[in-house]
Amino acid sequence: MNMFGRKYYINPETLRFEERNLTLKKQLRNSLVLGSGLLILALVMRVGYEQYAKSPRLVYYENINNELRSEYKILNKSIQLDEMRLAELERRDDRFYRSIFGIEPLAPSIREAGTGGSPRYSALQSISNPDMIIDVSIKLDKVSNKARIQSASFEDIEELAERNLKLLACKPSIQPISPEDRYWMTSTFGYRTDPFNKRRTFHRGIDLAGPYGLDIYATGEGVVISAEYNTHGYGREVVIDHGFGYKSRYAHLQKINVEKGDKVKRGQVIGKLGSTGRSTGPHLHYEIHFNRKSINPLYCFYEDITPREFKIISDRAAQP
Ligand SMILES: [Zn+2]
């Protein structure tokens, strides 16, 4: 049998095609070539494996590294979002909240205070690839510092808002007699001729004349510090301490409805109009003190009355 130029025959013992003319020498040479070929292939594979293939440990660390890298990216994104939210809060703080209470916006130097190059970042330099970590650390520090300053600013504002609310409740700011009741001003605040000795003296309040027994109202929240007969001319009087430096006096009362130490609300009836003490007829002498100085009570009416009403009261004062 002739196949590819070689002679084959069927071996009767093995029943296989076999090359007829293979000598022992030829067979030996073939084996050697095959053997050394396999050896070279094994060596090449070994070197190649060591050169290019990754050890399981390396693969493990690379995976962790990739995870950290993507976590860092997420962290960076969230810091950026926080920075944006904070910037919006700062803007609102300066533009609205602080301006409502008339406080200066926080200077940028204060908002940025305590951030920037700090020696503690140098400790991170020893870590391989430190830029990424230092970058995040600086950003985090800045954000948390700004947040701290912002929250302190909000606390200031909250305190001021509470104080303002309290002040609004306490400050004498309504008329001590209801505008519904008929009354007229017989004496204004300032220098006048005293009705008793006809001397020019300073009148520390306003006189509101009306019928006996008219309800007299507390003009702001506070504590009654006097509710008795005053022997210096005020007659039966009530004095209320409103805090914040404000006090109010209601003099010449016919009747007193409160006691010393009572807490009173704005609009609460504290007594009845009368003519006790140094008085020429039924009227209320009303004073407001601010920081131990008497001020014109009319200026405190404006929160309660319209300009038209203000004019009516002023006109009434001009009447004889
Ligand atoms: Zn008076």
Image (spheres, grey):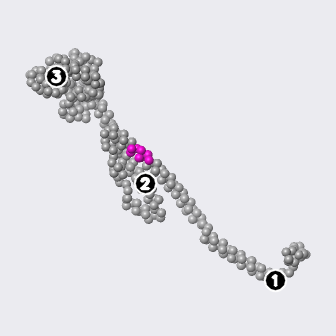
Mark 1 residue crowding within 10 angstroms, few (<14) / some (14–19) / many (20+)? few
Is 87 magenta? The answer is yes
Looking at the image, tell me whether mark 1 or mark 3 is earlier in sequence order: 1
Element carrying mark 2: helix
Q: Residue furthest top?
A: 211
Mark 2 residue crowding within 10 angstroms, few (<14) / some (14–19) / many (20+)? some
Q: Nearer the viewer, mark 2 or mark 3?
A: 2
- Taking the spot 34% from the left edge, 41% from the top edge, the residue there is 98
Magenta-tinted stretch = 84-91
Q: Amino acid at mark 1?
A: Leu
Q: List the residue tagged with mark 2.
A: 139
Looking at the image, tell me whether mark 1 or mark 2 is earlier in sequence order: 1
Q: Amino acid at mark 3?
A: Gly
Q: What is the C-alpha distance between the residues marked 2 and 3?
A: 70 Å
- Is residue 263 in sight in this rendering? no
Q: Pointers 1 and 3 in contact (CB under 8 A)? A: no
Element carrying mark 1: helix
Q: List the residue tagged with mark 3.
A: 235
Quadrant of res 268: top left
Q: List the residue tagged with mark 1.
A: 24
Element carrying mark 3: strand
Quadrant of res 295: top left
